[in-house]
Amino acid sequence: MYNKMLSTTKHKTLEWLDFVKSQENKITKKTLDTYFNDYLRFRNEMKDKRTIYNTPQRDIKTIVQNTDYNKRAMLNIAIVILKSKDKPIDMLMKYRDDIYNEKQTNQAEKNRNIIKNSQVSYKQLISTITDKQVGNYVITGIDYILFYLLINFNTRNKDLVIKVISNKDKKELLNNEENFIIVSPNKATLIRNDYKTKSSYGTKKDVIRNIRFNKYIKMELAKANKALFVNNKNNPYKPYDFSKMISSRFQYYIPDATKLTQAVIYKIITANAHSNGDIKTMKKIADNRGSSLQTQMEQYQSNDYKDGAEDFDVESE
């Protein structure tokens, strides 16, 4: 099962197989495979013949501190192996908390810098779908649709590969593999079957009753394009095409905007909700994104980003 282990020494092989036996019916094969790769890295860093479970906690901590590998992953494999042998792990658990807290602080600082460098405030971002005019321009058509989806449903690039169909044609055209917007007389329904975390969160279905959005989506339906978002040759955008396109379209209306990708937009919106302690909105954003609230807090918070919260959708029927 673990061919890489063939090149290791006997004591390493026995240690790992002993651990595998102790975890039988407790963890998934996927988790075990991840542990195995981390185990090999840890053994490589040890550079001696001791088993992990016979190595003092202070020595394990030193190994983790000096590694170039992922410190949390390296520390975790040592902890689970020690735990399987009922060995003390108190010092390592405290160190893991320290690593986590340091990562949180660094991530928050990184997010603040990303938001600052985008040169777009939360208020400016939301104005692209709530205001009648942004600068000298009225945002209409496909740009409004794009901004609305990014802001209200926190979509990634892959989510935006969408086909537009009419309600009367859905029985014939709808499937479980692609993303769709189904256009009805007084609403549009966004269905996401193909997005990053579909395997964990399933198909997402959202009803849109925004008047402006429905006006423009009907216009797009009438064009009968292969997809909602197409290039100047009428070919559908691929997921990797969207970052540049999104940044360009926002910069057209907000000239100072810099590299405003879907990820940065998500950070701005999440940071605003987090700084206002708006748990309800934070949960909604996480659900829209197809992620857990914990992941959102860990990866996208910026702690002290300030800008008043507003209602995203001001023109609903």
Image: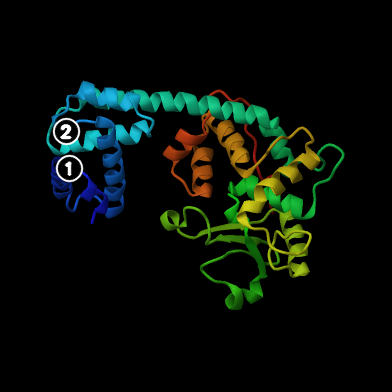
* Residue picked out by circle 1: 9
Which quarter of the image is occupied by the N terminus? Answer: bottom left
In-front residue for pair 68/136: 68
Badge 1 element: loop
Residue type highlighted by circle 2 = Lys
- Secondary-structure class at tag 2: loop
Whole-angstrom CA distance, mark 1 to mark 2, is 9 Å
Q: Position of residue 312 (x, y in %)?
A: 65, 42
| Circle 2 Cα neighbour tier, 10 Å, few/some/many (<14 / 14–19 / ≥20) | few
The residue drawn where x is 59% and y is 31% is 272
Residue at figure coordinates x 59%, y 41% from the top left: 263
Residue 313 seen in this snapshot? yes
Question: In this view of the protein, can residue 308 be seen by the observer?
Answer: no
Assess whether mark 2 and mark 1 are in contact (beta carbons under 8 angstroms).
yes
Q: Amino acid at mark 1?
A: Thr
For the C terminus, the quadrant is: bottom right
Q: Which residue is mark 2?
A: 49
Mark 1: give few (<14), some (14-19) or many (20+) Cα within 10 Å.
Answer: few
Q: Position of residue 218 (x, y in %)?
A: 75, 64
Residue visible at 55% across and 28% down in the picture:
110
Percent coordinates x, y for residue 217 in the rendering: 73, 60
On the image, the x and y values in percent for residue 174 come to 57, 72
Q: Is residue 226 left or right of residue 269?
A: right
As drawn, 52 above or below 199 = above
Q: Is 202 displayed left or right of 162 in the figure?
A: left
Task: Write down the quadrant of residue 142 in the picture.
Answer: bottom right
Q: Is residue 63 above or below residue 233?
A: above
Q: Is residue 266 above or below residue 89?
A: below
- Residue 233 occupies which quadrant of the picture? bottom right
State the colouring used for the structure image: rainbow
As drawn, which residue projects farthest toward the bottom?
A: 172
Query: Would you say 315 lies left or right of 10 here?
Result: right
